[in-house]
């Protein structure tokens, strides 16, 4: 069975962290003399700090050893707990229902970026920055807390790493170095964020917008301070800056760290996953641009390429920033973008989706198995980054895609059961499972139209997607609780 | 390289057969004094017979040995050739374009049952029966010609069997017995068809309608002589008769044959694939009925169950008969039916879709691989019908589903590119790849709205689906042509 004191003790940490953040935002609001906002942050923040502190003191047990099971339960509950705690100021400030506030909070922390709010431009600046910061913190959580901190605790943590954030073989590649680099990963994350904020500022954004959007770009979260998202700025320069930093946010932060150490930029290219990811981005962007030109949606090649590239990068990195009105595009294009969201970025990054390492292994597996069907003498093994991929990893990857397909179909049917049409239900589910954000059709601008049942389902989908299916699935397997 | 004389010699057989059928229908029209119809059949039928006869005489080479490659090329070209030949009378009688006529003909022969025609009730009886007969012949082709005749030719044919009609391990189960039973399989097919026609007649259909619908029921083709399909008869009894014979058509004809020999009905239940298939039909029908009741679409339980069962059986067996107006159902229900079409019937039957043998092996594979992820000591092997499933078969099954998913996504995007919306494009593609027939949305009643490009794509999709992906795919793999 699960070690409850251990789990509670571990859960006190993210709670303390969330309480501190809310307290900080309350203090900022006080400085800005925005008393009602300050109250909305200080009260939940203070209560959370108090409760977590008490828990921390009561359960003085030192955590020597957490089991694989404890780690999985902890990972899942962390998202649930921080989702609920993060929702309290959202509810207090905007007056939305508890259901919607939890959705917004989970959407922020999982770096999904789907929203039930509209009229963003009129909301208080402190509150807007809080939303952006939740995304940044969620991205940091994925990169640091789970990739680096938990594995250091014990062996169970290492296995969590395998189930959770990284790709199927990434732990083998990264973990020895990551354990040493743990303290530096967050530095890389902050450095890239600062670079992004500076670039946005030089590109023409206000200081506030530059910081706000850097937080949701590097975390591939996609929240904006404007209803029109990046379309607000009406600038190809801004789009191109966003492209660069969304791509950086979707590449392994372990790789960024090693490149920062070694100063060898060529390592990006020598990394098979990154190389295939970047080549795919270039190829699909070009195809999309040609498609838009063919349908005469844009007149000039460069205009079409710029918009195509931005939207493809936004969707494939699971950021979800918007610019052009996608309903004005030929119908296949937005659906293709949603499907690109299923591809995802690279493992060990903040991006969602399936991750290119899995796409590559699945592609090579299917190709190899097909060749063997035709010619039994064909080579059986497949290689990734020159290493032979073990059968267990190939099987795990194929199982992963089965979960992606099954979850997508079942959630889509369930969402249609709440009254959405196919396009809306499918895109809403894809937006949440891949922590992507924007939907199409009835959920094209925000998720306000979805019923309460639908909102809870989508909140669950975001957590399932962020934990990459296995973690949550393991909790649902009866045998898991028996061992 | 492909042995061209061999392939041409083999292709003369289906051409002769098609010519003879058309000649026969022309003769029937003459007897009925319908001269313009007679001409539409006699001319293409006569020319086809002549050309095929000449080919047959010129290429006197005896076929001692056909290679695996020849067999695959032959299987693919058979559908293309008979599709084109079968289209000639359709074009002559209805005046539709060549593109649409080929679609209708391919749709008939592959037992898909999608149509570009409307106003069926007003078309000449001879022509309507020709459409129905093409479906029956197509179903017979799948059951006999490929399952029984080709394997007897040589070893290459045996491998074709594996790639084409039967499920992934069905050849091991059936082939030794099927080789003996070859001559009897068509008898089983005819017996079940006669039983179906008799039942429909006793159920209240006219003799013409009873025969016409028996041809498209046992072949799981789904063509009707009425625009309203089975809804024309407004009878629960007719629906229930159709249920029985659609299910029989979707169960292995090899199994039917063995049961006819042994008189052991319990063999249906002892066959794992058939058992899971029937249990799934019962379970999903019940769920669908409860869903319809919950949405108050029907008032009584039995009415809801009858309609739910009929439509589920119609879709899961890939027959595609219609009755109720599906647009009046809650939106999730028709989409769920389309997804049921992906499940399909049993291997060795006329049904399309993925087939339950593959569903079962894929489910067990994913379950086993997931358990092993959680507990490396978990049992590795999986069993089907008490036999251990070889790794190569598991891999082939997972590769199969990858092709299903990839084909569905790419064809859907391509169809959206021709102007259909998501629901219409997705359902049209699913209807064709699974040789199912009916679509939703813009293709809800017929496929007339689809552009010429779209129609050719869908015609290709039907052949790819009927040949279960591998056959056509193999032809696209460059290495295939090198060996
Ligand atoms: K996102
Ligand atoms: K059909």
Image (tube, coloured by chain):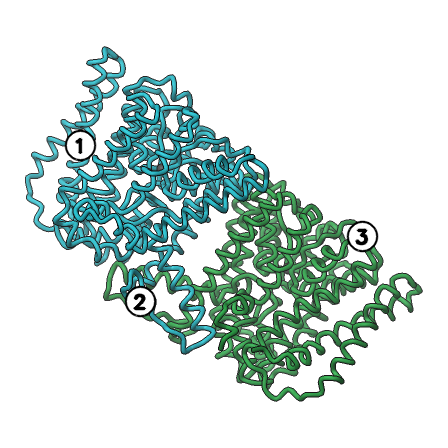
Chain colours: A cyan, B green
Any mark on residue A391, and which? 2
Residue B92: percent from left, percent from top: 83, 59
Tell me where residue B173 appears, x and y as whole percent: 49, 78
Mark seen at residue A17:
1
Left or right: residue A33 versus residue B241 is left
Question: Nearer the viewer's eye, disc 2 or disc 3?
Answer: 2
Query: B158 or B281, which is in the foreground?
Result: B158
Callout 3 crowding tier (Cα within 10 Å): few <14, some 14–19, many ≥20: few
Q: Is mark 2 within 8 Å of ligand 1?
A: no
Circle 2 SS class = helix
Residue A73 position, x and y percent, is 23, 46
Q: Please tell me in which quadrant of the rendered image residue B28 appears.
A: bottom right
* Cα distance in 3D space between marks 1 and 3: 72 Å
Which residue shows up at 59% across the image and 69% down it?
B349
Q: Is residue B201 visible?
A: no
Circle nearer the N terminus (1, 2): 1
SS at badge 1:
helix
Left or right? Give the position of A463 relative to A6. right
What secondary structure is found at the residue carrying circle 3? helix
Q: How crowded is mark 1: few (under 14 residues within 10 Å), some or many (20 or more)?
A: some
Horizontal side of B365 relative to A4 (left or right) equals right
Q: Quadrant of ligand 2?
A: bottom right
Are discs 1 and 2 both within one chain? yes
Above or below residue A158? Residue B482 is below
């Amino acid at each position: 069975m699960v070690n409850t004191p251990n789990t509670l003790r571990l859960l006190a940490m993210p709670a303390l962290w969330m309480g501190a953040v809310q307290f900080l935002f309350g203090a900022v609001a006080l400085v800005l003399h925005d008393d009602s906002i300050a109250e909305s942050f200080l009260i939940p923040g203070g209560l959370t700090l108090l409760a977590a502190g008490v828990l921390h003191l009561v359960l003085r047990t030192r955590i020597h050893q957490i089991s694989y099971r404890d780690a999985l339960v902890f990972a899942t509950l962390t998202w649930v707990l921080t989702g609920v705690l993060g929702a309290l100021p959202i509810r207090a400030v905007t007056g939305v229902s508890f259901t919607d506030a939890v959705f917004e909070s989970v959407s922020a922390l999982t770096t999904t970026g789907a929203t039930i709010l509209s009229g963003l431009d009129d909301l208080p600046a402190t509150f807007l920055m809080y939303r952006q910061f939740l995304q940044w913190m969620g991205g940091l959580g994925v990169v640091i807390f789970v990739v680096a901190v938990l594995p250091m605790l014990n062996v169970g943590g290492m296995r969590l790493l395998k189930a959770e954030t990284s790709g199927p073989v990434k732990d083998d590649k990264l973990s020895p170095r990551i354990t040493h680099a743990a303290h530096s990963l967050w530095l890389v994350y902050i450095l890239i964020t600062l670079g992004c904020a500076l670039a946005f500022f030089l590109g023409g954004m206000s200081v506030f917008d530059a910081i706000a959007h850097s937080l949701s770009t590097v975390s591939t979260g996609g929240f904006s301070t404007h209803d029109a998202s990046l379309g607000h700025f009406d600038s190809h320069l801004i789009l191109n800056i966003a492209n660069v930093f969304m791509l950086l946010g979707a590449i392994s932060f372990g790789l960024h760290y090693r490149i920062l150490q070694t100063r060898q930029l060529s390592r990006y290219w020598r990394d098979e996953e990154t190389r295939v990811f970047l080549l795919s981005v270039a190829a699909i962007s070009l195809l999309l641009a040609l498609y838009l030109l063919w349908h005469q949606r844009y007149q000039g090649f460069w205009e079409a390429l710029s918009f195509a590239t931005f939207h493809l990068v936004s969707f494939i990195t699971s950021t979800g920033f918007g610019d052009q009105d996608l309903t004005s595009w030929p119908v296949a294009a937005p659906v293709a973008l949603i499907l690109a969201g299923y591809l995802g970025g690279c493992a060990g990054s903040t991006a969602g989706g399936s991750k290119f390492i899995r796409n590559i292994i699945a592609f090579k597996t299917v190709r190899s198995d097909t060749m063997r069907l035709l010619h039994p003498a064909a080579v059986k093994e497949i290689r990734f980054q020159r290493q032979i991929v073990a059968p267990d990893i190939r099987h795990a990857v194929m199982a992963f895609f089965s979960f992606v397909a099954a979850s997508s179909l079942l959630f889509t049917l369930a969402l249609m059961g709440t009254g959405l049409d196919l396009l809306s239900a499918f895109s809403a589910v894809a937006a949440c499972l891949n922590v992507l954000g924007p939907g199409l059709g009835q959920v094209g601008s925000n998720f306000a139209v979805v019923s309460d049942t639908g909102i809870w389902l989508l909140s669950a989908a975001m957590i399932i997607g962020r934990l990459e299916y296995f973690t949550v699935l393991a909790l649902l397997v009866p045998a898991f609780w028996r061992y």
